[in-house]
Image (cartoon, rainbow, N blue to C red):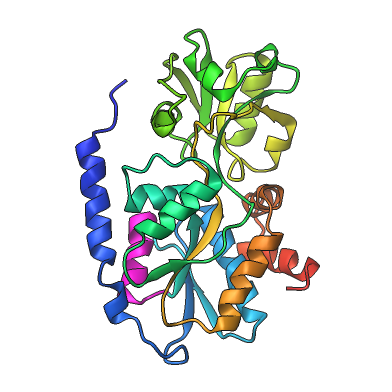
Amino acid sequence: MTVRSSVLVAALTMSIAGLLGGCSAGASTDPASRPIVVGAGSTDLSQLLAQIYAGGLRSTGTDVEVKEDLGDRADYLAALDRGEVTMVPDLTGDLLRTFDATSSATEAEDVYTELNRSLPAGLSVGDYATAEDRLAIAVASGNAVDDGTTVAEFLRRSDVTVGTVEGEVHPMDVRTEGVGSPSFTGAGFSEFMVYPDAQFAVDELNSGAVDALAIRTASFGPLAKDLTTLPDDDSVYPAQNVVPLYSNGVLEESALESFSVVAGELTTADLADMIGEVRSGVPSGEVAGRWLGERNL
């Protein structure tokens, strides 16, 4: 399998960093001078998180608009740079990889610390939540491969097949995301099966068609509850905690405090359940509103 070109990754990182470098110049120092717009990309997770944080902001009396379908990460970061949105919820590990592709941090606090250090002028992040969408290796409950096997040990094996869900986990990421971990020397297996959705993937796992699934802990949805996640004792895969990224000088203190409130309440299980609702056809705003209401937010 061909490994992603480090030159291309570096070029993309430099391009985005350069694009965002002028954020501080365009940001107003008067919090009341422009509306608060929460941006979201094209994924269910991104749009759900935007609705959750927007609801938290509204609880402080802030007038909020949600702008969805902005595209991928580069697109909504560009919208943040242009001042079209005020903040976007995202994941710590993915943001760190965007702003500093050379970082080897994988533990949650280390990733957050290095993310803060790597942010372009004019941008800040709020508290990160325990909720995460981390890459994980999952097996069917009771599967023999779960007999004390860690992620690092599993990845070194050459006799296993791993399934992924199309558009959720790229097979290349399963093999390469952990290269920054000093305990991970590379994956031994090379056989992947890509499935159209989570239910299909779980059915194939239970039938023995694959030995494990590479999943995102929240994006996979509520079916993740039926799986056993292998322990990642060596932090092979970097932390991917939910975090708000925002432009400086725009938000009131009460708005910033609402980010901390959301961070203190949101869990990975909450996100997985809500993702399931959204994919069943319930609007993300309605799902987020119910979650916020249950917590008096």
Compared across the picture, whether 244 is left or right of 285 comes to left
Quarter of the picture holding the N terminus: top left
Where does the image place residue 102, in percent across and percent down from the top left?
A: 31, 42
Residue displayed at 57% across by 58% down: 128
| Observer able to see residue 197 | yes
Compared across the picture, whether 162 is left or right of 8 comes to right
Q: Main secondary structure of the magenta part?
A: helix
Q: Nearer the viewer, residue 6 or 40?
A: 6
Any magenta on residue 79?
Answer: yes
Residue displayed at 64% across by 54% down: 278
Count every numbered label the image shows and give the total: 0
| Observer able to see residue 283 | no
Compared across the picture, whether 19 is left or right of 64 comes to left
Where does the image place residue 217, in percent across and percent down from the top left?
A: 61, 40
Q: Which residues are magenta?
A: 72-85
Location of residue 207 by image quarter: top right
Compared with 254, 215 (above or below) is above
Q: Nearer the viewer, residue 102 or 86?
A: 102
